[in-house]
Image (cartoon, rainbow, N blue to C red):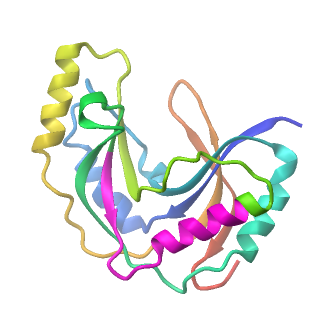
Amino acid sequence: MADLRLFFSLDLPARLKEALSRYQRTLPRSLFRPLKPENLHITLAFLGDTPEEEVPHLSRLLTDLPLPSRLVLTAGRPLALPSLSRISVLTLKVGNPGGGLEDLASSLREALLDTGHSFDPKPFKAHLTLAYLHRSLSPGEREEAREIILSLPPFRFGRFSPESITLMQSTLTPAGSIFTPLATRSFRGEP
């Protein structure tokens, strides 16, 4: 069996994806490569290359994971990752006025560790990826991208609640990533 590139993510409401798509359209395509609206999500844990035979175990882990009945989130100011001086990704900072998001990410990561699954160990930083910087940019173009990010207004949408948490497969292609849901669980308790 082959390895699959996997991650756990929060699925976003369609209205939010539409608003994010409009916000992405303000970015010059010569500098930024926006995610497709259907690929917009909040990553909770990135597992990377994982043996395909682990998918049933990870699906069970998702089924057993304690979930809040509802999360209330906000998306606001633009954020460059890993930093403004070394931008590779444009994101929006995600707020959690009602609490629970950090606990969910922590519970998921603990469950992964307890079951022997590895994941990217970087601390959880709640964000929503909007676009990637083109890799071949000149120093001048990188500075232009930095100035654009600094001048972007905060994203204004109000509060939203993710619909579900998903174990997602990411297949890399020259045209961008293709995401395939492998297991999904609603925040209302339905599978």
What residue is shown at x 71% (from left), y 66% (from top)?
111
Residue 102 magenta:
yes
What residue is shown at x 51% (from left), y 32% (from top)?
176
What residue is shown at x 41% (from left), y 42% (from top)?
35
**Quadrant where the image shows the N terminus:** top right
Q: Is residue 141 left or right of residue 162?
A: left
Q: Is residue 139 left or right of residue 93?
A: left
Position in image of residue 68 (x %, y %): 55, 83
**Quadrant where the image shows the C terminus:** bottom right
Q: Nearer the viewer, residue 111 or 78?
A: 111
Determine whether 187 is above or below 93 in the image.
below
What residue is shown at x 44% (from left), y 53% (from top)?
40
Q: Nearer the viewer, residue 86 or 132?
A: 86
Position in image of residue 90 (x %, y %): 31, 41
Determine whether 50 is above or below 139 in the image.
below
Segment colored magenta: 91-112
Q: Is residue 176 left or right of residue 75?
A: right
Position in image of residue 126 (x %, y %): 41, 59
Which quadrant holds residue 110?
bottom right
Residue 92 magenta:
yes
Q: Is residue 19 left or right of residue 156?
A: right
Figure disc tally: 0
Position in image of residue 169 (x %, y %): 66, 47
Which quadrant holds residue 58?
bottom right
